[in-house]
Amino acid sequence: GDSVTQTEGQVTVSESKSLIINCTYSATSIAYPNLFWYVRYPGEGLQLLLKVITAGQKGSSRGFEATYNKETTSFHLQKASVQESDSAVYYCALSGGSNAKLTFGKGTKLSVKS
Amino acid sequence: GGIITQTPKFLIGQEGQKLTLKCQQNFNHDTMYWYRQDSGKGLRLIYYSITENDLQKGDLSEGYDASREKKSSFSLTVTSAQKNEMAVFLCASSQGISNERLFFGHGTKLSVL
């Protein structure tokens, strides 16, 4: 089946430093999956951060970027300078084909310290 | 904008009990989903529905029933709660399927004594 593997557990970064959360995927049933990053801020529901549906393209939102790399089957999330307000849990996900299923990674908790 | 409301926020049950979780959305979305999240694991799809009265099984449908009697609501029933079970159930909706953006509720946290 399809799967998503992302940086596990918690990542702590100092404010204004750069961030990368790794995400790799395996899509056995879909040639070109759609790729997503979702985020859950404290006290809020899970929400879409960015999505890319075309291989080779980059998505961006709120200063975060992720590039759909089909060769390395990766979709790493990056930010050049994190803020305390970026502290949240981030989930990489994929979907595609004829079904509605989003396959999620386990989530990465980002803590930004001032 | 719209909102997804899940009730109850917390649910405590007994082993063997049948438990029902409810979800309402006012986005007028066609597709609704139920996901389960266990500690340290990703979200896993239980059921989804692409229109009123439609039901599709996800990866984790065994032990659950679902009902989509209205476009705006989607309920999930745990047919027999398992002792010491603890998980968060997330409801979501989207206009279409596959590459569509999902909107999530805040979740129902289940604890089984």
Image (tube, rainbow, N blue to C red):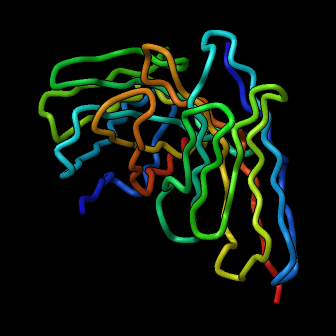
Specify whether residue A107 is in view.
yes
Query: Which sits in the foreground, B31 or B23?
Result: B31
Q: Residue at x 20, y 39 (%)?
A: B73
Farthest bottom residue in view: A114
Specify whether residue B82 is in view.
no
Q: Residue at x 56, y 31 (%)?
A: A34
Farthest front residue in view: A56
Is residue B94 toward the left or the right of residue A86 in the image?
A: left
Farthest left residue in view: B70
Q: What count of labels does the image hold? A: 0
Identify the image quadrant of residue B9.
Answer: bottom left
x and y percentages locating residue A53 in the rendered image:
54, 34
Question: In which quadrant of the rendered image does the C terminus of chain B lie?
Answer: top right
Q: Is residue B11 above or below residue A63?
A: above
Q: Is residue A101 above or below residue A15?
A: above
Is residue A39 toward the left or the right of residue B109 in the image?
A: right
Q: Residue at x 59, y 57 (%)?
A: A39
Query: Which sits in the foreground, B11 or A90?
Result: A90
Q: Is residue A104 above or below residue A27?
A: below
Is residue A76 toward the left or the right of residue B22 in the image?
A: right
Question: In which quadrant of the rendered image does the N terminus of chain B lie?
Answer: bottom left
Is residue A69 toward the left or the right of residue A99 in the image?
A: right
Q: Residue at x 67, y 19 (%)?
A: A2
x and y percentages locating residue A26 in the rendered image:
75, 21
x and y percentages locating residue A48 in the rendered image:
50, 53
Identify the image quadrant of residue A29.
Answer: top right
x and y percentages locating residue B50 in the rendered image:
27, 24
